[in-house]
Amino acid sequence: MRTLTTTKQLDRLLQIISDLRGPQGCSWGKDQTLKSMLPNLLEECYECIEAIEQQEHEPPNNDLIAEELGDLLFNVLMLVQIGADENKFDLNQVCHTITEKMILRHPHVFTQERQESGSKEEKVILWEQIKSKKTNRTSRLDGIPLKLPALSVATRQGEKAASVGFDWPDVTPVLHKVEEEWNELQEAIKTNDLNAIEHELGDILMSLASLGRHLNTPAETALRRANKRFRKRFTTMEDIATQNNTALEKMDAQTLDALWEKAKNQLK
């Protein structure tokens, strides 16, 4: 495995960011605050995720991943520069904090407690236990950002609860739980009580997040990819309709279903 080292290009990037924020910098760079950078940071995170996920379904484009990682790195270092300009924190503090945190949370790698045994799941549990001891949080769930997508929150809550043994032993009882929640949702639908329906729909989504966790397939990732598949198929339907000089809104349900299947087959 290659060990990453600092490079002249990294030093150059740090200087560019400093110049952007400096007296002769651009107005955009000088006007940024920690808060104003948040939309950019979030956007770049998702663009990076999308570039990485494309590798699994399309010809590899490592240059695209490098570009998106660069955009993300720029935003992170821009935030650090803003923090330094406002005397809140600097790059040394940021690097020191994460270095110490990683050493503390990986005693099986960096201390005399080194060991090769233990499954991935056992090491995740150890990670969560160490985190809970070294923070001032009152609950293991406090560290989960509530601004995460809801399915991601459900997955992370399940992981943290599992660190104290509050979890199903394997996937079979999770499947039973999904079936149980599905039946309860159907009963709620019969009542026409919107609050009850919302409650049960939320429960089944949470149980599906647990199922994804036990299958090593995060529900958020699965849904994002399903959305992407739907988008490709639907836009293909639109293209086929345009080629045939027809409009989707003028088609009946049976014709739309047939066109959907045609689009699916075309994309295989």
Image: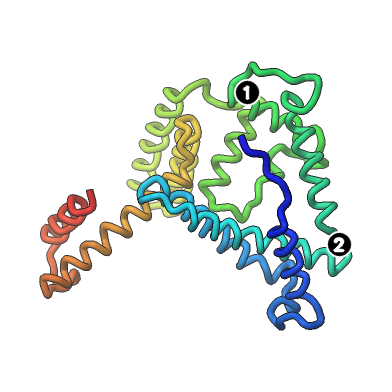
Element under disc 2: loop
* 82 sits to left or right of 174: right
Residue at 75% across / 37% down in the picture?
A: 102
Relative to 44, is 161 above or below?
above
Mark 1 residue type = Glu
Residue marked by disc 2 = 88
Residue 16 in the image, given as x and y percentages of width and height: 72, 70
Q: Quadrant of residue 133?
A: top right
For badge 2, the amino acid type reads: Lys
Residue 53 in sight in this render: yes
User: In the drawing, does residue 103 fall left or right of residue 244?
Assistant: right
**The quarter of the displayed image where residue 130 is located:** top right
The image quarter in which residue 89 lies: bottom right
Q: Is residue 186 above or below residue 24?
A: above
Crowding near the residue tagged with mark 2, few <14, some 14–19, many ≥20 C-alpha atoms within 10 Å: few
Q: Nearer the viewer, residue 9 or 139?
A: 9
Q: Is residue 132 visible?
A: no
Residue under numbered circle 1: 122
